[in-house]
């Protein structure tokens, strides 16, 4: 057996003691991978003299320079960042922040691969360090926003250039892989690997038991459609509201529960509530607000249909969580949702192309009428846990390093 691989993970997205759920999907993958490879994590934190005086950044002052999260050594160097301005120039300050940390780490941890979990400023800085030490590189594409197409500065150009130089690309969906292949010019170095799901947290519970715990109405005629996400336009809750009048006429006890609050892209509650009022759906649409993560398992199990109505996503974890609970699902074809639904053998409930009211209504109607074996569906989806995800990443590492190194048997 060869040496155990050493991975240096670089990620702008990662939890810390003040933001335990920030980029938690990166933590989940790396924490599971640490069973098979050795990992250290660098998660740079933006800083400027203005940050201590800005409410949204004050908490970052308390983040330690080093902490252990999920059994992983995590380093938090500060890099200079002016809020909202000069973003395309941050690769330089990011590199200056990580270089002394990496130089020190390498004295006792001679890493084999720099594994980056965001594109900018991770990619330019990570590639510079890889060139310095002649190491292999990998990046994960986690959403279309990773390409920075929406930005008017040079970040999209810098990302496109960096993708031609990185050694391996992991994409969370076929859509991301295809776009990344166009920019990199090399489809041979890309692989699609969806996020895993925490099957210890999301599992099947009897629907009536879940409803009783939440104080929701029980009975076969009391139908529930569930949506989970920030109350922003992109999540498409308005699309479901548009089709509810016809569905309520068929299913008299139907309710649509929306779990979530305002998000970083704004607050769409006023528009949603105005639409509810205009359609006479008060009492049918319930905006429940945010709930504790531990309570989501009861919500997924309480619904008759989980609906992901988003106009855009990277890898919608809420869809995987719902399917892991055995909840029937209807989804728009965004991000990795088509791949996730295919893993659950639910491709007939994916809305392709531009979402129109008739298509959405027909699929929701059909899902509300069918009798699903939810405990069996949940059991079948359990194989797509974070260990499955980690084991899917390992061949990418192996291909990068072969024949220099090997991994522990998995």
Image: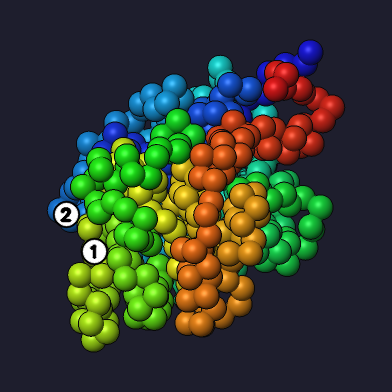
Name, please, the residue furthest toward the top.
Answer: 1
Report x, y in % for residue 344. Answer: 61, 49
Report x, y in % for residue 38. Answer: 59, 22
Drawn side of residue 299 relative to residue 175, left or right: left
Q: Residue 39 shows which numbered tag?
A: none
What residue did someone put label 1 on? 287
Tell me what residue is drawn at x 22 percent, y 36 percent: 62
Tell me what residue is drawn at x 33 percent, y 31 percent: 65
Q: Is residue 328 visible?
A: yes
Q: Quadrant of the N terminus?
A: top right
Report x, y in % for residue 63. Answer: 28, 36
What residue did someone put label 2 on? 55
Name, please, the residue furthest toward the right.
Answer: 403
Q: Tell us which disc is closer to us: 2 or 1.
A: 1
Name, please, the residue furthest toward the bottom.
Answer: 278
Label 2 element class: helix
Drawn side of residue 321 relative to residue 136, left or right: left
The relative height of residue 106 versus residue 318 in the rendered view (above or below) is above
**C-alpha gap between disc 2 and disc 1:** 27 Å
Nearest to the observer: residue 163 or residue 87: 163
Tell me what residue is drawn at x 25 percent, y 77 percent: 281
Q: Quadrant of the C terminus?
A: top right
Please tell me which of labels 2 and 1 falls first in the chain: 2
Nearest to the observer: residue 194 or residue 62: 194
Q: Is there CB contact under 8 Å for labels 2 and 1?
A: no
The relative height of residue 28 versus residue 6 in the rendered view (above or below) is below
The relative height of residue 185 versus residue 27 in the rendered view (above or below) is below
Q: Is residue 197 visible?
A: no
Tell me what residue is drawn at x 54 percent, y 28 percent: 32
């Amino acid at each position: 057996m060869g040496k155990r691989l050493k991975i240096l993970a670089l990620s702008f997205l990662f939890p810390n003691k003040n933001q335990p759920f920030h980029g938690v999907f990166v933590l989940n993958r790396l924490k599971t991978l640490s069973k098979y490879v050795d990992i250290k994590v660098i998660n740079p934190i933006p800083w400027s003299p203005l940050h201590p005086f800005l409410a949204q950044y004050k908490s970052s002052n308390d983040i330690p320079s080093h902490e252990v999260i999920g059994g992983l050594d995590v380093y938090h160097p500060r890099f200079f960042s002016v809020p909202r301005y000069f973003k395309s120039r941050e690769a330089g300050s990011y590199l200056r922040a990580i270089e002394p940390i990496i130089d020190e780490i390498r004295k006792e941890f001679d890493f084999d691969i720099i594994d980056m979990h965001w594109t900018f400023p991770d990619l330019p800085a990570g590639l510079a360090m890889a060139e310095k030490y002649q190491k292999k590189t990998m990046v994960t594409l986690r959403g279309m926003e990773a390409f920075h197409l929406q930005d008017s500065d040079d970040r999209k150009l810098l990302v496109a250039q960096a993708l031609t130089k990185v050694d391996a690309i992991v994409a969370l969906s076929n859509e991301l892989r295809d776009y990344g292949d166009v920019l990199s010019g090399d489809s041979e170095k890309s692989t699609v690997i969806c996020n895993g799901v925490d099957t210890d947290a999301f599992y099947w519970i009897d629907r009536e038991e879940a409803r009783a715990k939440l104080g929701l109405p029980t009975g076969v005629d009391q139908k529930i459609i569930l949506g989970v996400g920030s109350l922003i336009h992109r999540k498409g809750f308005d699309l479901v509201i548009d089709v509810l009048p016809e569905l309520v006429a068929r299913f008299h006890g139907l309710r649509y529960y929306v779990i979530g609050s305002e998000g970083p892209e704004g607050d769409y509650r006023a528009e949603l509530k105005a639409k509810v009022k205009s359609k006479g759906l008060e009492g049918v649409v319930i905006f429940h607000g945010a709930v504790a993560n531990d309570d989501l398992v009861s919500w997924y199990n309480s619904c008759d249909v989980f609906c992901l109505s988003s106009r855009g996503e990277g890898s919608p974890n809420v869809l995987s969580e719902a399917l892991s609970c055995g909840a029937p699902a209807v989804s728009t074809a965004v991000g990795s949702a088509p791949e996730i639904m295919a893993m659950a053998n639910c491709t007939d409930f994916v809305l392709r192309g531009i979402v129109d009211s008739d298509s959405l209504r027909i699929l929701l109607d059909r899902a509300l009428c069918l009798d699903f074996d939810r405990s069996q569906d949940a059991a079948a989806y359990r194989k797509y846990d974070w260990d499955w995800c980690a084991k899917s990443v390992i061949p990418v590492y192996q291909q990068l390093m072969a024949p220099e190194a090997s991994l522990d048997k998995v």
